[in-house]
Image (spheres, rainbow, N blue to C red):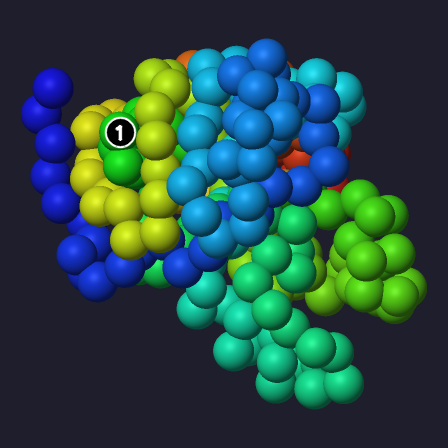
Amino acid sequence: MAVSAVEGADECPIASLQQHRTRASAAIRNLLQKGAFKREVDNFFAKGSPQAPTVHGGPEKAVYAYPAEHYEYWRKELPEVAFSWGRFGEHITTEWLREGTLCIGDSLKIGSAVLMVNQPRMPCYKLDLRFDRDDMIKRFLMSGRSGFYFSVIEPGKVILGSKVEIVSRDANRVTVVDIVRLYLGQTRDPDLRQRAVNVSVLPENWRAQLLLRAQTDRDDTGS
């Protein structure tokens, strides 16, 4: 398996680990019962997910990661809010990984686990509830700081300071932030849209939304 190091990966790329209320796999449940899975300690990812197989979960949303660097932005935007790692409901708070450089379909080795980038986060009403604000969904989307979901390709162990390596890059080179910008209509680049639609691991609901946006654009321009 060919791998390359992520810049800064030796400088504690995993800032924090969280376990949130999800329907855990048998392996995760066993760890919970033994008290081995605690906040900011060893974390194990079982293939499939530690995330519930619901509209908000499933294998395509097995692990949610959010960049630690975004917290400074949110502290300035919302100075009245107390921010600590995990505030956005992420399982992993990362360093050195960004929506503008990670592409849908990229595979990363984090610790001994291999994860694949699947999609950006599309926030729902729970984000408004979490922050007790009725404008948080819009703020989150427009900020371009969506974080990203991983599926689990190979189960493994991740701890604070685990090394991050790039296993493979998707040939279409469509970043996480590209998907958000296409969805919001912030870019109408037809070549980028086609490359996004061609990414095999992009979930069907996202693909359908991008195709719908393309049709809306055509209707608007009369072409």
**Percent coordinates x, y for residue 165 in the rendering:** 20, 39
Residue that appears at 81% across and 58% down? 130
Q: Is residue 39 left or right of residue 127?
A: left
Q: Is residue 158 left or right of residue 149?
A: left
Question: Which residue bears the numbered disc 1?
Answer: 112
The amino acid type of the residue labelled 1 equals Ser
- Nearer to me, 38 or 117: 38
Residue that appears at 60% across and 41% down? 19
Mark 1 is surrounded, within 10 Å at the Cα level, by few (under 14), some (14 to 19) or many (20 or more) other residues, namely some
176 up-or-down from 105: above or below:
below
Q: Quadrant of the N terminus?
A: top left
Q: Is residue 166 left or right of residue 84?
A: left
Residue that appears at 57% across and 36% down? 35
144 up-or-down from 121: above or below:
below
**Percent coordinates x, y for residue 65 in the rendering:** 50, 46
Residue 116 visible? The answer is no
- Nearer to me, 197 or 176: 176
* Number of residue marks: 1
**Percent coordinates x, y for residue 213 in the rendering:** 67, 35
